[in-house]
Amino acid sequence: MRAVIQRVSEAKVAIGGAIRGAVERGLLVLLAIEEADGPEDIEWLSGKIVRLRVFDDENGVMNRSVQEAQGGILLISQFTLFASTKKGNRPSYSRSARPEVAIPLYEQFIQRLTADFGKPIQTGEFGADMQVSLTNDGPVTIIMDSKSRE
């Protein structure tokens, strides 16, 4: 699994002109799933996202998690995070899991992230044409990959 995590002062996702999910202060998480992903990837990445200390404490130091900052989480599926541009100018998405594999893992990830976070998260819709808007706060943007675990 690969995730792009952005600290936001606001973020929302619209589908067909209607707002599907929104958060004020919190995290926008763009998530891609590959064929080789499984429960251990879900567990590791969810825990890292919830515990990631990217919010300022009383001293202005990034030392608080999204939970401690009382923020929200907006999760968006985005298969293009596994794009390969090695050959030519047209990206290949062959590393991204097919929907029959990705959808159940995405739904499991939502359940795990909700449980780890301790309250409901906001989401988009897997495979939908979504319009995502955000105000990146900082900016703070972090990329995580459950296979490299850096």
Image (cartoon, rainbow, N blue to C red):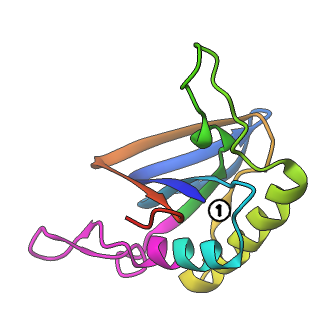
Q: Position of residue 22 (x, y in %)?
A: 59, 54
Numbered disc total = 1
Q: Quadrant of the C terminus?
A: bottom left
Give the image quarter of residue 142. bottom left
Q: Position of residue 55 (x, y in %)?
A: 28, 68
Q: Which residues are magenta?
A: 47-72
Q: Is residue 13 left or right of residue 50?
A: right
In this orientation, which residue lies closer to the viewer: 131 or 100? 100
Q: Is residue 130 magenta-colored?
A: no
Q: Residue at x 70, y 78 (%)?
A: 39
Q: Secondary structure at mark 1?
A: strand
In this rendering, the answer to whether 36 lies above or below 108 is above
Residue sitting farthest toward the right: 100
Residue neighbourhood size for the residue with mark 1, other residues' Cα within 10 Å, grouped as few (<14), some (14–19), many (≥20): some
In this orientation, which residue lies closer to the viewer: 26 or 32? 32
Q: Amino acid at mark 1?
A: Gln
Tell me if I can see residue 65 in this picture: yes
Q: Residue at x 36, y 81 (%)?
A: 68
Q: Position of residue 27 (x, y in %)?
A: 46, 60
| Residue under numbered circle 1 | 122
In this rendering, the answer to whether 39 lies above or below 13 is below
